[in-house]
Protein backbone atom coordinates (compact mmCIF):
# COMPACT_ATOMS: atom_id res chain seq x y z
CA UNK A 1 0.00 0.00 0.00
CA UNK A 2 1.38 3.40 -0.88
CA UNK A 3 1.93 5.79 1.97
CA UNK A 4 -0.29 8.81 2.55
CA UNK A 5 1.00 12.16 1.33
CA UNK A 6 1.74 14.43 4.25
CA UNK A 7 2.63 18.08 4.64
CA UNK A 8 5.79 18.24 6.75
CA UNK A 9 8.76 20.45 7.53
CA UNK A 10 12.07 19.07 6.28
CA UNK A 11 13.23 18.57 9.85
CA UNK A 12 10.07 16.62 10.71
CA UNK A 13 10.54 14.49 7.59
CA UNK A 14 14.05 13.50 8.78
CA UNK A 15 12.61 12.33 12.11
CA UNK A 16 9.81 10.31 10.50
CA UNK A 17 12.19 8.80 7.95
CA UNK A 18 14.70 7.74 10.63
CA UNK A 19 12.01 5.80 12.51
CA UNK A 20 10.70 4.27 9.29
CA UNK A 21 14.18 3.21 8.19
CA UNK A 22 14.34 1.11 11.34
CA UNK A 23 17.10 3.21 12.88
CA UNK A 24 18.29 1.97 16.27
CA UNK A 25 19.13 5.28 17.85
CA UNK A 26 19.18 9.07 17.59
CA UNK A 27 21.43 11.18 19.79
CA UNK A 28 21.21 14.94 19.57
CA UNK A 29 21.31 18.30 21.23
CA UNK A 30 18.92 21.12 20.28
CA UNK A 31 19.97 24.01 18.05
CA UNK A 32 18.01 26.19 15.62
CA UNK A 33 17.16 25.64 12.76
CA UNK A 34 16.99 21.87 13.24
CA UNK A 35 15.44 21.43 16.70
CA UNK A 36 12.25 19.93 15.19
CA UNK A 37 14.21 16.74 14.42
CA UNK A 38 14.67 15.95 18.12
CA UNK A 39 11.27 17.43 19.03
CA UNK A 40 9.44 15.30 16.45
CA UNK A 41 11.26 12.15 17.56
CA UNK A 42 10.32 12.86 21.18
CA UNK A 43 6.72 13.43 20.12
CA UNK A 44 6.54 10.23 18.04
CA UNK A 45 8.03 8.15 20.90
CA UNK A 46 9.50 5.42 18.68
CA UNK A 47 10.93 3.61 21.74
CA UNK A 48 7.37 2.42 22.35
CA UNK A 49 6.86 1.13 18.80
CA UNK A 50 10.06 0.16 16.97
CA UNK A 51 12.28 0.22 20.06
CA UNK A 52 14.42 3.03 18.63
CA UNK A 53 16.35 4.95 21.28
CA UNK A 54 15.96 8.76 21.24
CA UNK A 55 18.21 10.65 23.57
CA UNK A 56 18.88 14.31 24.20
CA UNK A 57 22.52 14.23 25.20
CA UNK A 58 24.19 16.74 27.53
CA UNK A 59 26.17 18.23 24.64
CA UNK A 60 26.99 17.82 20.96
CA UNK A 61 30.22 16.03 21.92
CA UNK A 62 28.32 13.49 23.98
CA UNK A 63 25.79 12.97 21.18
CA UNK A 64 28.33 12.25 18.44
CA UNK A 65 30.35 9.97 20.72
CA UNK A 66 27.16 8.01 21.49
CA UNK A 67 26.80 7.65 17.72
CA UNK A 68 30.43 6.46 17.57
CA UNK A 69 29.69 3.84 20.22
CA UNK A 70 26.41 2.74 18.68
CA UNK A 71 27.99 2.48 15.22
CA UNK A 72 30.84 0.35 16.62
CA UNK A 73 28.16 -2.08 17.80
CA UNK A 74 26.73 -2.24 14.25
CA UNK A 75 23.63 -0.22 15.09
CA UNK A 76 22.00 2.19 12.63
CA UNK A 77 22.48 5.44 14.52
CA UNK A 78 22.26 9.11 13.64
CA UNK A 79 22.76 12.57 15.05
CA UNK A 80 21.77 16.01 13.82
CA UNK A 81 22.79 19.56 14.52
CA UNK A 82 23.37 22.92 12.87
CA UNK A 83 26.68 24.50 11.89
CA UNK A 84 28.26 25.44 15.29
CA UNK A 85 27.12 22.10 16.71
CA UNK A 86 28.54 20.21 13.74
CA UNK A 87 31.89 21.92 14.33
CA UNK A 88 31.88 20.44 17.84
CA UNK A 89 31.28 16.97 16.39
CA UNK A 90 34.23 16.98 14.00
CA UNK A 91 36.68 15.10 16.20
CA UNK A 92 34.39 12.10 16.59
CA UNK A 93 33.45 12.19 12.88
CA UNK A 94 37.13 11.72 12.04
CA UNK A 95 37.23 8.77 14.51
CA UNK A 96 34.08 7.24 12.97
CA UNK A 97 35.65 7.50 9.50
CA UNK A 98 38.94 6.05 10.77
CA UNK A 99 37.12 3.22 12.53
CA UNK A 100 35.29 2.50 9.23
CA UNK A 101 31.93 2.72 10.91
CA UNK A 102 28.56 3.49 9.31
CA UNK A 103 26.73 6.49 10.75
CA UNK A 104 24.44 9.26 9.58
CA UNK A 105 24.96 12.91 10.45
CA UNK A 106 22.55 15.70 9.56
CA UNK A 107 23.68 19.34 9.31
CA UNK A 108 20.90 21.90 8.82
CA UNK A 109 23.27 24.76 8.08
CA UNK A 110 22.92 28.30 9.46
CA UNK A 111 24.95 31.45 8.98
CA UNK A 112 28.46 31.51 10.41
CA UNK A 113 31.29 31.75 11.24
CA UNK A 114 31.17 31.55 15.02
CA UNK A 115 27.79 31.28 16.67
CA UNK A 116 26.57 33.30 13.69
CA UNK A 117 22.87 33.59 12.88
CA UNK A 118 20.02 31.11 12.78
CA UNK A 119 19.09 31.81 9.15
CA UNK A 120 19.91 29.54 6.17
CA UNK A 121 23.45 29.22 4.85
CA UNK A 122 25.63 26.81 2.88
CA UNK A 123 28.94 27.90 4.33
CA UNK A 124 29.81 24.42 5.69
CA UNK A 125 30.49 22.97 2.22
CA UNK A 126 34.25 22.89 2.84
CA UNK A 127 33.77 21.38 6.28
CA UNK A 128 31.59 18.54 4.96
CA UNK A 129 33.39 17.74 1.70
CA UNK A 130 37.03 18.41 2.55
CA UNK A 131 37.11 16.73 5.95
CA UNK A 132 36.16 18.99 8.86
CA UNK A 133 38.10 16.81 11.25
CA UNK A 134 41.73 15.73 11.07
CA UNK A 135 43.31 13.17 8.79
CA UNK A 136 42.73 11.92 5.25
CA UNK A 137 39.08 10.95 5.31
CA UNK A 138 35.97 11.69 3.28
CA UNK A 139 32.31 12.04 4.14
CA UNK A 140 29.63 10.94 1.71
CA UNK A 141 27.77 14.25 1.43
CA UNK A 142 24.14 14.39 0.30
CA UNK A 143 22.49 17.74 -0.51
CA UNK A 144 18.66 17.63 -0.36
CA UNK A 145 16.69 20.36 -2.15
CA UNK A 146 13.18 19.38 -1.03
CA UNK A 147 11.34 17.97 1.95
CA UNK A 148 10.89 14.76 -0.03
CA UNK A 149 14.65 14.43 -0.34
CA UNK A 150 15.10 15.15 3.38
CA UNK A 151 13.02 12.01 3.94
CA UNK A 152 14.58 9.95 1.13
CA UNK A 153 18.20 10.76 1.97
CA UNK A 154 17.90 9.29 5.47
CA UNK A 155 17.50 5.83 3.93
CA UNK A 156 20.00 6.57 1.16
CA UNK A 157 22.54 7.90 3.65
CA UNK A 158 22.23 4.86 5.93
CA UNK A 159 22.40 2.45 2.98
CA UNK A 160 25.58 4.07 1.62
CA UNK A 161 27.08 4.27 5.11
CA UNK A 162 26.55 0.54 5.68
CA UNK A 163 27.55 -0.41 2.12
CA UNK A 164 30.95 1.25 2.49
CA UNK A 165 31.28 1.27 6.29
CA UNK A 166 31.84 5.01 6.33
CA UNK A 167 29.92 7.98 7.73
CA UNK A 168 27.49 9.93 5.53
CA UNK A 169 26.18 13.45 6.06
CA UNK A 170 22.98 15.11 4.91
CA UNK A 171 24.06 18.69 4.23
CA UNK A 172 20.80 20.62 4.38
CA UNK A 173 20.11 24.23 5.29
CA UNK A 174 17.55 26.31 7.16
CA UNK A 175 15.30 26.55 4.10
CA UNK A 176 14.73 22.81 3.53
CA UNK A 177 14.74 22.30 7.30
CA UNK A 178 12.04 24.87 8.01
CA UNK A 179 9.82 24.79 4.93
CA UNK A 180 6.79 22.56 4.59
CA UNK A 181 6.05 20.59 1.45
CA UNK A 182 4.23 17.49 0.39
CA UNK A 183 6.13 14.35 1.24
CA UNK A 184 5.54 10.66 0.83
CA UNK A 185 7.29 8.84 3.64
CA UNK A 186 8.98 5.47 3.09
CA UNK A 187 7.22 2.37 4.43
CA UNK A 188 8.02 1.28 7.98
CA UNK A 189 10.86 -1.24 8.13
CA UNK A 190 11.59 -3.45 11.08
CA UNK A 191 14.76 -2.79 13.06
CA UNK A 192 17.40 -5.45 12.53
CA UNK A 193 17.43 -8.26 15.06
CA UNK A 194 20.66 -9.09 16.89
CA UNK A 195 21.05 -12.18 14.66
CA UNK A 196 20.65 -10.13 11.47
CA UNK A 197 23.11 -7.57 12.81
CA UNK A 198 25.75 -10.21 13.61
CA UNK A 199 25.34 -11.67 10.13
CA UNK A 200 25.41 -8.36 8.23
CA UNK A 201 28.06 -6.68 10.39
CA UNK A 202 30.56 -9.39 11.37
CA UNK A 203 32.96 -6.60 12.37
CA UNK A 204 30.57 -5.18 14.99
CA UNK A 205 31.42 -5.23 18.68
CA UNK A 206 28.65 -7.52 19.87
CA UNK A 207 30.43 -9.59 22.52
CA UNK A 208 33.02 -12.27 21.80
CA UNK A 209 31.63 -15.61 20.72
CA UNK A 210 33.58 -18.88 20.71
CA UNK A 211 32.87 -19.19 16.97
CA UNK A 212 34.92 -16.16 15.98
CA UNK A 213 37.96 -14.06 16.80
CA UNK A 214 37.72 -10.97 18.94
CA UNK A 215 36.52 -7.84 17.15
CA UNK A 216 38.65 -4.88 18.10
CA UNK A 217 37.60 -1.32 17.31
CA UNK A 218 40.40 1.18 17.62
CA UNK A 219 41.67 4.11 15.60
CA UNK A 220 45.06 4.20 17.33
CA UNK A 221 48.02 2.64 15.52
CA UNK A 222 51.50 3.40 16.77
CA UNK A 223 53.30 1.82 13.82
CA UNK A 224 53.27 4.33 10.94
CA UNK A 225 53.83 1.58 8.38
CA UNK A 226 50.62 -0.12 9.49
CA UNK A 227 48.86 3.23 9.63
CA UNK A 228 49.88 3.86 6.04
CA UNK A 229 48.32 0.59 4.88
CA UNK A 230 45.13 1.53 6.75
CA UNK A 231 45.17 4.89 4.96
CA UNK A 232 45.71 3.22 1.60
CA UNK A 233 42.74 0.94 2.27
CA UNK A 234 40.62 3.99 3.14
CA UNK A 235 41.70 5.78 -0.03
CA UNK A 236 40.79 2.74 -2.16
CA UNK A 237 37.36 2.75 -0.60
CA UNK A 238 36.96 6.48 -1.32
CA UNK A 239 38.00 5.86 -4.92
CA UNK A 240 35.32 3.21 -5.23
CA UNK A 241 32.70 5.59 -3.83
CA UNK A 242 33.95 8.29 -6.23
CA UNK A 243 33.47 5.92 -9.17
CA UNK A 244 30.10 4.49 -8.19
CA UNK A 245 28.03 6.89 -6.14
CA UNK A 246 28.01 10.27 -7.91
CA UNK A 247 24.48 11.65 -8.13
CA UNK A 248 23.31 14.82 -9.85
CA UNK A 249 20.34 16.23 -11.71
CA UNK A 250 20.11 18.49 -14.76
CA UNK A 251 17.48 20.92 -16.01
CA UNK A 252 17.45 22.58 -19.45
CA UNK A 253 21.07 21.60 -20.20
CA UNK A 254 20.57 19.96 -23.62
CA UNK A 255 20.70 23.27 -25.54
CA UNK A 256 22.36 25.41 -22.86
CA UNK A 257 24.90 28.14 -23.69
CA UNK A 258 25.34 28.92 -20.00
CA UNK A 259 25.21 26.79 -16.89
CA UNK A 260 24.31 27.43 -13.28
CA UNK A 261 25.75 24.96 -10.77
CA UNK A 262 23.97 25.06 -7.42
CA UNK A 263 23.12 22.58 -4.67
CA UNK A 264 20.38 22.24 -2.08
CA UNK A 265 17.70 24.87 -1.60
CA UNK A 266 19.47 27.59 -3.59
CA UNK A 267 19.27 25.31 -6.65
CA UNK A 268 15.48 25.66 -6.42
CA UNK A 269 15.79 29.45 -6.33
CA UNK A 270 18.28 29.28 -9.23
CA UNK A 271 15.86 27.11 -11.22
CA UNK A 272 13.23 29.84 -10.95
CA UNK A 273 15.82 32.37 -12.15
CA UNK A 274 16.65 30.04 -15.06
CA UNK A 275 12.97 29.76 -16.02
CA UNK A 276 12.77 33.58 -16.08
CA UNK A 277 16.06 33.95 -18.01
CA UNK A 278 14.80 31.46 -20.61
CA UNK A 279 11.71 33.63 -21.07
CA UNK A 280 14.18 36.45 -21.82
CA UNK A 281 15.82 34.32 -24.52
CA UNK A 282 18.89 33.11 -22.60
CA UNK A 283 19.69 29.45 -23.12
CA UNK A 284 20.74 28.54 -19.61
CA UNK A 285 20.57 25.29 -17.67
CA UNK A 286 21.08 23.93 -14.18
CA UNK A 287 23.33 21.21 -12.89
CA UNK A 288 22.53 20.28 -9.33
CA UNK A 289 25.02 18.03 -7.57
CA UNK A 290 23.09 15.71 -5.24
CA UNK A 291 26.28 14.19 -3.87
CA UNK A 292 28.74 16.99 -3.03
CA UNK A 293 31.30 14.33 -2.31
CA UNK A 294 31.70 12.41 -4.54
CA UNK A 295 31.43 15.45 -6.83
CA UNK A 296 29.99 15.19 -10.40
CA UNK A 297 33.26 16.41 -11.93
CA UNK A 298 33.07 14.33 -15.12
CA UNK A 299 29.69 15.71 -16.12
CA UNK A 300 30.79 19.27 -15.38
CA UNK A 301 33.87 18.72 -17.55
CA UNK A 302 31.62 17.50 -20.39
CA UNK A 303 29.31 20.48 -20.04
CA UNK A 304 32.29 22.85 -19.99
CA UNK A 305 32.87 21.84 -23.63
CA UNK A 306 29.34 22.92 -24.46
CA UNK A 307 28.67 26.11 -22.49
CA UNK A 308 30.33 29.54 -22.68
CA UNK A 309 30.36 30.16 -18.95
CA UNK A 310 29.32 28.85 -15.57
CA UNK A 311 27.75 30.67 -12.64
CA UNK A 312 28.04 28.96 -9.24
CA UNK A 313 25.25 30.06 -6.96
CA UNK A 314 25.84 29.24 -3.32
CA UNK A 315 24.73 30.71 0.00
CA UNK A 316 28.36 31.29 0.97
CA UNK A 317 31.40 33.26 -0.17
CA UNK A 318 32.42 30.73 -2.84
CA UNK A 319 33.22 27.17 -1.76
CA UNK A 320 31.79 24.67 -4.28
CA UNK A 321 33.14 26.95 -7.02
CA UNK A 322 36.62 25.54 -6.31
CA UNK A 323 35.42 22.04 -7.20
CA UNK A 324 33.63 23.35 -10.29
CA UNK A 325 36.81 25.13 -11.46
CA UNK A 326 38.86 21.98 -10.86
CA UNK A 327 36.26 19.95 -12.74
CA UNK A 328 36.42 22.06 -15.89
CA UNK A 329 40.19 22.55 -15.69
CA UNK A 330 39.70 26.35 -15.69
CA UNK A 331 39.05 26.29 -19.44
CA UNK A 332 35.98 28.51 -19.27
CA UNK A 333 34.88 31.43 -17.12
CA UNK A 334 33.42 30.34 -13.80
CA UNK A 335 31.88 33.00 -11.58
CA UNK A 336 30.37 32.88 -8.13
CA UNK A 337 27.27 34.52 -6.73
CA UNK A 338 26.20 34.23 -3.13
CA UNK A 339 24.87 36.04 -0.09
CA UNK A 340 26.42 35.66 3.33
CA UNK A 341 25.64 35.32 7.00
CA UNK A 342 22.12 33.93 6.64
CA UNK A 343 20.77 36.12 3.83
CA UNK A 344 19.07 34.08 1.10
CA UNK A 345 19.25 35.50 -2.44
CA UNK A 346 16.00 35.79 -4.36
CA UNK A 347 15.60 34.76 -8.03
CA UNK A 348 16.02 38.33 -9.32
CA UNK A 349 19.42 38.72 -7.63
CA UNK A 350 20.58 35.59 -9.47
CA UNK A 351 19.29 36.98 -12.77
CA UNK A 352 21.11 40.29 -12.13
CA UNK A 353 24.29 38.40 -11.30
CA UNK A 354 24.05 36.48 -14.58
CA UNK A 355 23.79 39.70 -16.62
CA UNK A 356 26.62 41.34 -14.64
CA UNK A 357 28.98 38.41 -15.11
CA UNK A 358 28.09 37.68 -18.73
CA UNK A 359 27.42 41.14 -20.25
CA UNK A 360 28.30 39.77 -23.72
CA UNK A 361 25.64 37.01 -23.59
CA UNK B 1 -2.65 27.54 -11.95
CA UNK B 2 -0.06 29.08 -9.66
CA UNK B 3 -0.56 31.47 -6.75
CA UNK B 4 2.42 33.05 -5.03
CA UNK B 5 1.30 34.48 -1.70
CA UNK B 6 2.95 36.38 1.13
CA UNK B 7 1.17 36.73 4.48
CA UNK B 8 2.77 39.22 6.86
CA UNK B 9 1.94 40.82 10.18
CA UNK B 10 2.90 40.86 13.85
CA UNK B 11 4.09 37.71 15.58
CA UNK B 12 1.07 36.35 17.44
CA UNK B 13 -1.54 37.37 14.86
CA UNK B 14 -1.63 33.83 13.52
CA UNK B 15 0.15 34.58 10.26
CA UNK B 16 2.07 31.29 10.18
CA UNK B 17 -0.97 29.22 11.21
CA UNK B 18 -3.08 30.86 8.57
CA UNK B 19 -0.48 29.97 5.97
CA UNK B 20 -0.36 26.42 7.30
CA UNK B 21 -4.13 25.99 7.05
CA UNK B 22 -4.05 27.41 3.52
CA UNK B 23 -1.25 24.97 2.66
CA UNK B 24 -3.21 22.02 4.05
CA UNK B 25 -6.29 23.14 2.12
CA UNK B 26 -4.18 23.13 -1.06
CA UNK B 27 -2.98 19.62 -0.17
CA UNK B 28 -6.65 18.55 0.11
CA UNK B 29 -7.20 19.97 -3.39
CA UNK B 30 -4.24 17.87 -4.68
CA UNK B 31 -2.13 20.93 -5.44
CA UNK B 32 1.62 21.25 -5.02
CA UNK B 33 2.46 23.53 -2.12
CA UNK B 34 5.39 25.13 -0.32
CA UNK B 35 5.18 26.95 3.03
CA UNK B 36 8.30 28.89 3.89
CA UNK B 37 8.33 30.95 7.12
CA UNK B 38 10.73 33.75 7.93
CA UNK B 39 11.85 31.92 11.05
CA UNK B 40 14.30 34.45 12.42
CA UNK B 41 14.27 36.00 15.89
CA UNK B 42 12.28 38.89 14.42
CA UNK B 43 9.13 36.86 15.12
CA UNK B 44 9.32 37.64 18.81
CA UNK B 45 7.20 40.76 19.25
CA UNK B 46 8.17 41.92 15.79
CA UNK B 47 6.99 41.05 12.32
CA UNK B 48 6.31 37.54 11.07
CA UNK B 49 5.77 36.41 7.53
CA UNK B 50 5.28 33.27 5.51
CA UNK B 51 5.45 32.59 1.78
CA UNK B 52 2.87 30.09 0.55
CA UNK B 53 2.92 28.86 -3.05
CA UNK B 54 0.09 26.77 -4.50
CA UNK B 55 0.45 25.29 -7.96
CA UNK B 56 -0.78 22.48 -10.18
CA UNK B 57 2.84 21.97 -11.34
CA UNK B 58 6.05 21.31 -9.38
CA UNK B 59 7.24 24.43 -7.56
CA UNK B 60 10.82 25.62 -8.03
CA UNK B 61 11.80 28.40 -5.65
CA UNK B 62 10.10 28.56 -2.24
CA UNK B 63 11.66 32.04 -1.85
CA UNK B 64 10.26 34.89 -3.96
CA UNK B 65 10.73 38.55 -4.75
CA UNK B 66 7.26 39.24 -6.16
CA UNK B 67 3.82 37.94 -5.29
CA UNK B 68 0.39 37.43 -6.84
CA UNK B 69 -1.25 38.07 -3.49
CA UNK B 70 0.04 39.95 -0.45
CA UNK B 71 -1.90 39.87 2.82
CA UNK B 72 -0.50 42.51 5.15
CA UNK B 73 -1.69 43.00 8.71
CA UNK B 74 0.48 45.85 9.99
CA UNK B 75 2.14 49.01 8.73
CA UNK B 76 5.67 47.54 8.56
CA UNK B 77 4.46 44.67 6.41
CA UNK B 78 2.50 47.00 4.14
CA UNK B 79 5.56 49.23 3.70
CA UNK B 80 7.72 46.20 2.99
CA UNK B 81 5.53 44.21 0.62
CA UNK B 82 3.27 46.67 -1.27
CA UNK B 83 6.00 47.27 -3.84
CA UNK B 84 6.51 43.52 -4.34
CA UNK B 85 2.98 42.75 -5.54
CA UNK B 86 3.02 41.84 -9.25
CA UNK B 87 1.19 44.32 -11.50
CA UNK B 88 -2.40 43.09 -11.67
CA UNK B 89 -1.96 41.26 -8.35
CA UNK B 90 -3.95 41.58 -5.15
CA UNK B 91 -3.11 43.39 -1.91
CA UNK B 92 -5.33 42.63 1.07
CA UNK B 93 -4.84 44.74 4.18
CA UNK B 94 -6.54 45.38 7.48
CA UNK B 95 -7.00 49.11 8.05
CA UNK B 96 -6.62 48.59 11.82
CA UNK B 97 -3.35 50.26 12.82
CA UNK B 98 -2.57 51.39 9.28
CA UNK B 99 -1.58 55.09 9.08
CA UNK B 100 -0.53 55.20 5.44
CA UNK B 101 -2.91 53.35 3.14
CA UNK B 102 -1.58 51.61 0.01
CA UNK B 103 -1.07 53.91 -2.97
CA UNK B 104 -0.56 51.62 -5.95
CA UNK B 105 -3.17 51.74 -8.66
CA UNK B 106 -1.92 48.91 -10.89
CA UNK B 107 -3.00 46.25 -8.39
CA UNK B 108 -6.30 45.32 -6.78
CA UNK B 109 -6.27 46.75 -3.24
CA UNK B 110 -8.79 45.26 -0.81
CA UNK B 111 -9.30 46.85 2.59
CA UNK B 112 -10.73 44.31 5.02
CA UNK B 113 -11.86 45.36 8.49
CA UNK B 114 -10.92 42.05 10.03
CA UNK B 115 -9.97 43.42 13.45
CA UNK B 116 -13.34 45.15 13.78
CA UNK B 117 -15.07 41.91 12.80
CA UNK B 118 -12.98 40.01 15.34
CA UNK B 119 -14.01 42.38 18.13
CA UNK B 120 -17.62 41.98 16.98
CA UNK B 121 -17.32 38.19 17.24
CA UNK B 122 -15.69 38.56 20.66
CA UNK B 123 -12.73 36.18 20.29
CA UNK B 124 -9.33 37.54 19.33
CA UNK B 125 -8.00 34.10 18.42
CA UNK B 126 -10.10 33.83 15.27
CA UNK B 127 -8.60 36.95 13.71
CA UNK B 128 -6.48 35.00 11.27
CA UNK B 129 -9.45 32.89 10.15
CA UNK B 130 -11.42 36.05 9.36
CA UNK B 131 -8.47 37.23 7.27
CA UNK B 132 -8.30 33.82 5.56
CA UNK B 133 -12.03 34.14 4.80
CA UNK B 134 -11.36 37.56 3.29
CA UNK B 135 -8.69 36.05 1.04
CA UNK B 136 -11.11 33.36 -0.14
CA UNK B 137 -13.73 36.07 -0.72
CA UNK B 138 -11.37 38.01 -2.97
CA UNK B 139 -9.65 35.01 -4.60
CA UNK B 140 -11.31 31.61 -4.09
CA UNK B 141 -8.04 29.72 -4.64
CA UNK B 142 -9.15 26.78 -2.47
CA UNK B 143 -12.68 25.79 -1.51
CA UNK B 144 -14.16 26.10 1.97
CA UNK B 145 -14.48 22.31 2.37
CA UNK B 146 -10.76 21.91 1.80
CA UNK B 147 -10.03 24.63 4.36
CA UNK B 148 -12.17 22.86 6.98
CA UNK B 149 -10.36 19.60 6.22
CA UNK B 150 -7.09 21.51 6.52
CA UNK B 151 -8.18 22.86 9.91
CA UNK B 152 -8.89 19.31 11.09
CA UNK B 153 -5.36 18.32 10.03
CA UNK B 154 -3.62 21.25 11.74
CA UNK B 155 -5.66 21.47 14.96
CA UNK B 156 -4.95 18.87 17.64
CA UNK B 157 -8.01 16.64 18.12
CA UNK B 158 -8.79 18.14 21.55
CA UNK B 159 -9.43 21.45 19.82
CA UNK B 160 -11.73 20.10 17.12
CA UNK B 161 -14.71 21.51 19.07
CA UNK B 162 -13.45 24.91 17.90
CA UNK B 163 -13.88 24.10 14.21
CA UNK B 164 -17.46 25.47 13.94
CA UNK B 165 -16.26 28.78 15.44
CA UNK B 166 -13.39 28.90 12.94
CA UNK B 167 -15.77 28.09 10.09
CA UNK B 168 -18.05 30.93 11.19
CA UNK B 169 -15.02 33.24 11.25
CA UNK B 170 -13.99 32.25 7.72
CA UNK B 171 -17.55 32.87 6.48
CA UNK B 172 -17.60 36.23 8.25
CA UNK B 173 -14.34 37.11 6.51
CA UNK B 174 -15.75 36.11 3.14
CA UNK B 175 -18.68 38.50 3.66
CA UNK B 176 -16.30 41.38 4.42
CA UNK B 177 -15.17 41.39 0.81
CA UNK B 178 -18.61 41.69 -0.73
CA UNK B 179 -18.10 45.07 -2.22
Image (cartoon, coloured by chain):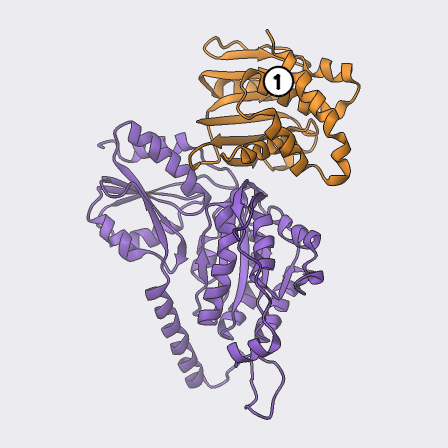
The C terminus of chain A appears in which quarter of the rendering? Answer: top left
Whether A166 is drawn above or below B37: the answer is below
Instruction: Give the letter of the chain under mark 1.
Output: B
Q: Seen in the image, is A269 located left or right of residue A31?
A: left
Q: Seen in the image, is A311 located left or right of residue B107?
A: left
Residue A31, given in percent of the width and then of the height, sits at 64, 50
Whether A355 is drawn above or below A163: the answer is above
Q: Looking at the image, how many numbered discs can be counted on the residues?
A: 1
Residue B46, given in percent of the width and then of the height, sits at 66, 28
Crowding near the residue tagged with mark 1, few <14, some 14–19, many ≥20 C-alpha atoms within 10 Å = many
**Residue B136 lies in quadrant:** top right
Q: Seen in the image, is A43 located left or right of residue A80?
A: right
Q: Which residue is mark 1?
A: B134
Q: What residue is shown at x 32% (from left), y 46% (from top)?
A: A250
Whether A60 is drawn above or below A164: the answer is above
In the picture, one chain is orange; tell me its letter: B
In the picture, one chain is purple; tell me its letter: A
Q: What residue is shown at x 56% (from left), y 76% (from top)?
A: A196
Choose between A38 and A338: the one closer to the eye: A38
Q: Secondary structure at mark 1?
A: helix
**Residue A56 lies in quadrant:** bottom right
Q: Residue furthest bottom?
A: A210
Amino acid sequence: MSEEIKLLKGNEAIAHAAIRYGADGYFGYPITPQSEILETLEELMPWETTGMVVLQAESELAAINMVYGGAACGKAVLTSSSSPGISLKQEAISYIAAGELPALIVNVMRGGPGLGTIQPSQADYFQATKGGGHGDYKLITLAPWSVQEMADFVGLGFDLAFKYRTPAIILADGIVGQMMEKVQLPPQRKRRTEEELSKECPWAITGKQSSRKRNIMTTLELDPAVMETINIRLQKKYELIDQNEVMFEEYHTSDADYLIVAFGSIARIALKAIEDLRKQGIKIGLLRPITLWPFPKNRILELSNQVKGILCVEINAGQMIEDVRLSCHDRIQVYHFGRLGGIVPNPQEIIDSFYNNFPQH
Amino acid sequence: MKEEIIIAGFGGQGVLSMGKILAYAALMNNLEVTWMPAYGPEQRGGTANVTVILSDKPISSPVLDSYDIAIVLNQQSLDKFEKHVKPGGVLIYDAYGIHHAPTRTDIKVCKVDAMDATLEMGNSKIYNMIVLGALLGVRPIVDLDAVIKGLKKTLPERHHTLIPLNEAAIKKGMQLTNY
